[in-house]
Amino acid sequence: MLEDWLAPKAAALEARGLTRRLRARDADDDLIDLAGNDYLGLARDPRVMTAAADAVRMWGSGATASRLVTGTTTLHEELESALAAYVGQESALAFSSGYLANLGVVTALGGPGTLLVSDEHIHASLVDACRLARSRVEIVPHNDVEAVEKVLAERNEPHAVVMTESVFSVLSDEAPLTELAAVAAARGAVLLVDEAHGLGVTGGGRGSVHAAGLAGLDHVVVTMTLSKSLASQGGVVLGPRVLREHLINRSRPFIYDTGLNPAACAAALAALGVLEAEPDRPAAVHAAAARLAAACDVPPSSGAVVSVPMPGPQQAVEAAEVCRRNGVLVGSFRPPSVPDGVSRLRLTAHAGLSSDDLDRACAVIVDAIGQVS
Ligand SMILES: Cc1ncc(COP(=O)(O)O)c(C=O)c1O
């Protein structure tokens, strides 16, 4: 039965060059990694790995239950306090992934009395959050502040949440946060900013909301993943304490999910400590991203991701494969993961890349693009 149902769908994807395949990596491969999201180069930092291993020895291999039962450890609270202090927010609440943090906050603020206003380039986790929230949703053109103001002004709902990313995940461009926060305040709305690509990279590491002077405002809410700059796993919602209390009581992805693994908490906390102690790491990410963008002749990126448009999905996959064969791991974006239908190579700049590695990676990538275009 499933064969008849699913095989034609698989064939249709294959014909369009859109099949996704898993490829397990070896722990000791010596590829230059421009595909993973370990922006600050901390996933194999001994301080971070030791913290995770120590946490396993102290707390065991899992959180053992929902945060509301036995799944909250002192590590969770330490991480939440440290991260909130670092990015200038009153409070933080950790979820077991960034995806769930987005689902958790949007569904807890959503409902029939809340309008959700979504930038058209928003990440899939926020798109899914809108679908689950039982709210009316208005999708507005990318970074269009006037369109946001119009839908806020015309709404009948008493509440509204405007959703954006500080640095967008595909194009790596920035949202006009100051303008959006002003419009939201004037129209009685909350601004929700996903800083998945901002934390550790923009604003000297503290993210774009902090850099824009918006951290701590009572209508600004931030979500973050622990899986990129903090080299771990998990997600966090940051904002006023009253929001944290509301999420603990009303956010189903928080209540009905096993708490974030203590080892992941400890790794993120240790990575945050390294970021604070070594504040030059974000600048190294920008320098590496600038070199990659210049080599590929694309505009400079605001974050760690450099997106290189390709003629089509097949060429994106082929170019990534040529790079891999030549020792450089890069990603590709293809529909439906791109907001504008354009397939791209996805290059991730890392703070830990040596100058020689970057030179070699640039040469391999440029050659691969030439081969398939
Ligand atoms: C913008 C954005 N939000 C949320 C997520 C989800 O975070 P996580 O991988 O921790 O679930 C990601 C990436 O994975 C992302 O790029």
Image: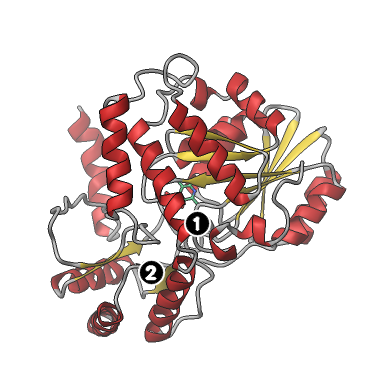
Task: Identify the residue under disc 1.
Answer: 276
Residue type at mark 2 is Ala
Q: Does the residue labelled 1 lie within 8 Å of ligand 1?
A: no
Q: Can residue 89 be seen in this view?
A: yes
Task: Identify the residue under disc 2.
Answer: 349
Secondary structure under tag 1 reads helix
Is residue 147 depicted above or below 189 in this figure? below
Query: Between marks 1 and 2, how big is the CA–CA gap?
Result: 20 Å
The residue under the point 22% across, 51% down is 21
Foreground mark, 1 or 2, reads 1
Q: In which quarter of the image is residue 135?
A: top right
Of mark 1 and mark 2, the one earlier in the sequence is: 1
In the rendered image, residue 191, in percent from the top left (x then y), is placed at 71, 47
Disc 1 crowd, CA 10 A, few/some/many (<14, 14-19, 20+): some
In the rendered image, residue 65, in percent from the top left (x then y), is placed at 39, 18
Secondary structure under tag 2 reads loop
Q: Quadrant of residue 4?
A: top left
Of 222 and 158, nearer the camera is: 222
Q: Does the residue labelled 2 lie within 8 Å of ligand 1?
A: no
Of 167 and 62, nearer the camera is: 62
